[in-house]
Image (spheres, rainbow, N blue to C red):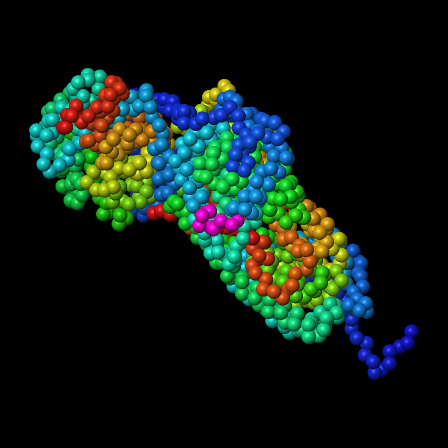
Amino acid sequence: MTPPTDSARIDVRKTYKLYIGGAFPRSESGRSYTVDDAKGRFLANASYASRKDARDAVVAARKAFGGWSGKTAYNRGQVLYRVAEVLEGRRAQFVDEVQRGEGVSKRQAEAAVDLSVDRLVWYAGWADKITQVVGGANPVAGPYFNLSVPEPSGVIAALAPQDSSLLGLVSVVAPIVVTGNTAVVTSSYLRPLPAVTLSEVLATSDVPGGVVNILTGRLADTAPTLASHMDVNGIDLTGTAGDPEHATALEQAAAENLKRVLRAPASEPDWTLEPGIERMTRFLETKTVWHPVGI
Amino acid sequence: MAPNEKAGTVFEYAPAPESRAVVDIKSSYGLFINGEFTDPAGGRSFKTVNPATEEVLAEVSEASTEDVDLAVKAARRAYTRVWSRMSGRERSKYLYRIARIIQERARELAVLESIDNGKPIKESRDVDIPLVAAYFFYYAGWADKLEYAGFGPTPQPLGVAGQVIPWNFPMMMLAWKIAPALAAGNTVVLKPAETTPLTALLFAEICQQADLPAGVVNIVTGAGETGRAVVAHEDVDKVAFTGSTEVGRAIAKAVAGTDKKVTLELGGKAANIVFDDAPVDQAVEGIVNGIFFNQGHVCCAGSRLLVQESVAEEVLERLKRRMGTLRVGDPLDKNTDIGAINSAEQLARIRELSDIGEAEGAGRWSPPCDLPAHGFWFPPTVFTGVSQAHRIAREEIFGPVLSVLTFRTPAEAVEKANNTPFGLSAGVWTDKGSRILWMADQLRAGVVWANTFNRFDPTSPFGGYKESGYGREGGRHGLEAYIR
Amino acid sequence: MPVTTVVNSASSSAGGLSPALAEATSSDSALRRFLHGLPGVDQVGAEARAAGLGTRSIKTTAKEFAIDLAIRMVDLTTLEGQDTPGKVRALASKAMRPDPADQTCPQVAAVCVYPDMVAVAKETLGASGVHVASVATAFPSGRAALDIKLADTQDAVEAGADEIDMVIDRGAFLSGRYLEVFEEIVAVREACGDAHLKVIFETGELQTYDNVRRASWLAMMAGAHFIKTSTGKIQPAATLPVTLVMLEAVRDFRDVTGQMVGVKPAGGIRTTKDAIKYLVMVNEVAGGDWLDPDWFRFGASTLLNDLLMQRTKMRTGRYSGPDYFTLD
């Protein structure tokens, strides 16, 4: 082995780990896989999340749910905005990871990162507006005060898109958590690096541990566990776009406890389009409260 | 003063039966497909009985897969050729027309509902049927205003809706399903429950009377097989189901991987929480209404009474005294409070779970009441000393059976209330405003009744959290299920 | 908080209040604490319950029973500035023989008049068994000094009144001077001697059901034999939900003390249908023990003729008309 020369510094390579409960554990399986760039060159090793990791992530997400959903909407909006700020600060790193992972031009990668930041800002603003848009007073025919408000469904499993490694990821995660849900996210299998870096952003931007949990690895290892998990309230199947058989199997498993399901599109959508509010409302419950009006 | 010697005079209410003459039950019924009553392809039929007497009321057709296919085809034709092309304003007028006919034939519908279902006439007359008309009125008004409903500037109908409804509120569930579907521009194939098909078939006549275009509403009668055929039909764009969580689960599995939009309104095991500062007389009424309304055949029934330990004994005493005044008997008697259990099968389930409750050590109590010799009956029943671990505290009994549990603090009340896979409804009784709002916030249920219980209104969204299903019925929210 | 928890006692000491209740009336602040510790009344729920009981359908034998009972519970009333001995004599005659054409028709419970008419009423009624009730205590406003109210009461009692219908000082009640109201009732009860005391709340002025419940307990603790809704001079007078709250109060009071107190809705009850709704409510809320003229009365005037017409209809099968019944 040739010793390094004096002039060439040995760089410190990053270990890409999972993000569970605000901590960065290696996979419980102890296994990792090689992540290559779009041209097949080695980029890094990523963790193979196991079923056990998925279960741990659900426990962490459930634990975080009360606190996160109990925060004021204003506060959640601020936290999400803070994520956008910190992400912006890491712009260069994300551009690099997106460019190499997705094999796009630098300009395209920059556009994706910028839009990711903007999307976070967009969703951050929704935190204290969605209630008024989808909730409201109901004029019942009787002496009752009657109000409907949206509430988060609980713990949501999100299968992030396989292609759009940052913009797609952000577009899936932000609408879930901005309303007070907590999330267990499986990243793109082949392009997990922006997801891992995003977890570092989340860890340093006032998002309480457990609100977002990120698993890298094969969907087949974790998705069935999440889809059938009885303490998961909803599942976003976006990451199975183009694989209807897998999507159907997961939806069937999700039926066991009547999970709210966001079905996968036939192919991955254009993430640059205006998202609309369906990604939020799919994981919101409507609670209606009645009270008599009298003296 | 001592109680008077003459006191205690008994005020016995003489029978006050509602007349059956207002309804005309045919000996047999066909399927309502494409605007006409038709014979089923398989020629099979089943009997529907009056649960209060076990008298056979009529022979009702059993729709086969083939019949369901015909109904869906009729609905599809009506959708593409007529209903989806019609302006919202015209659709609206059809719905208003239906609402008016329901009001005009209200007594007929109420009596028929009570005969086929077993529910007391005072409920079908004063609650169910007025609400049915109200739901049609409410959604009639939406038909030409959908672009303002908050679902985008060009809301589109889904197509053909396959709807399967339960036996506990036959007409009301029909209204909850059909009114929003039609308002949004969909056509429907609806399957009523096999034990309560008659009012849906009368509704078919009302559609004819309203000159509703053929195929817009199709009614296919039958049991589980027919329901499965409706849900599974590949030309159905939307599935709406109200019923058990077990069947809801099966439907969710059946539609996996399809483009069908689904709403499910399933079971519940609601906590009705009474604090020590509750308006106690109204709370007792709320407990009674919560569990004995419609014989407890209510998915949102307040079947778990959580009462603060400091007042548990007193609340229970008051509850028992009140239960002593409940009148069980002939559903058509205007003074009946609790009618017949809908079917022998349901009665068996209630008996089984009640026996389990007793075997598990809970204290069972019913007021003395003479039950009729024929028909399906179960007395109003309270179980005390129930813990969260008892099956009667966890499983939906769907009958007039209340499980009483106690708590000490608001946090404990919330913890126990939420400790269930269901999440349909909850009740809170306290005079303290801030506590009501805190409780309402903490309870994981789609409807929270504070200082009231079992109230329904067409403007008010209804539906569950968790295994109580998804989607909302009622209000602007109820349109979402039928709009793209 | 539920009543028994507040009172914390299930039995009463002989001839007086239980220690817990006596303690509650020992000072203004104790009484306030007690009354405000009673369970709240939710207006919507109470009205819904009353409306629900109002849908009971009372037919045939039950209706016959109810009509005769209602007649026996009527306090046939005239409380007008224009009352004269002649008017009162006529009323008293009617009280004894409501339907001159039908000997089986029961007589009413009492005739209710102003104090200066008591002697006239007593003279006419004699030993018929129909009681003379007199309003007193500066009826209907109650705005007079206590000694005047007591003199008013004594005057009526001395003239032969069997029952005294007093009004509470609503001003004192609404400004929270509960002990003053309590002591006034105690004093009037003393002035009544052997006459029975009915305490009128004028619920139309108390406004809330919470106040009605508090007034009920206050009056019962002060020794009222009957609690009564209204003077008939203020609208709304008696309503089903107000009476519901009062019936709940007498029921609960008996649970706690063993003592029964009567209830009298007065004013605005004009038809048989209305009266039957009240009887159903008595039956199902307070219980059958209260279905007796000793424990439930109707303060009414025009009600009687409607009861008589319905009674005749039940017996003859024909609907009657006002011409067939006396106007007094």
Which residue is rendered at x = 24% and y = 39% of the image? C237
In the picture provided, is C40 more to the left or to the right than B186? left
B455 and B308: which one is in front?
B455
- Residue A281 vs B68, above or below: the answer is below
Which residue is rendered at x = 59% and y = 30% of the image? B40
Q: Is residue C188 visible?
A: yes
Q: Position of residue C28 (x, y in %)?
A: 29, 46
Which residue is situated farthest in the bottom direction here? A7
Q: Position of residue B277 (x, y in %)?
A: 42, 44
Q: Position of residue B16 (x, y in %)?
A: 37, 24
In the picture provided, is C142 more to the left or to the right than B98? left
Task: Name the image quarter holding the N terminus of chain B.
Answer: top left
Q: Where is residue C271 in the image (x, y as percent from the top left)?
A: 25, 31
In the picture provided, is B436 more to the left or to the right than A119? left
B178 and C132: which one is in front?
B178
In the picture provided, is B189 more to the left or to the right than B452? right
Task: Let me know if residue B86 is in the magenta part.
Answer: yes
Which residue is situated farthest in the top direction here? C103
Which residue is situated farthest in the front direction here? B81
C161 and B379: which one is in front?
B379
Residue B75 falls in image quadrant: top right
The number of discs equals 0
Which residue is rendered at x = 18% and y = 27% of the image? C322
Residue C247 falls in image quadrant: top left
Q: Can residue C254 be seen in this view?
A: no
B444 and C157: which one is in front?
B444
Give the magenta-colored segment's residue range. B84-92
Which residue is situated farthest in the right direction here? A1
Task: Let me know if residue B281 is in the magenta part.
Answer: no
Which residue is rendered at x = 59% and y = 57% of the image? A279
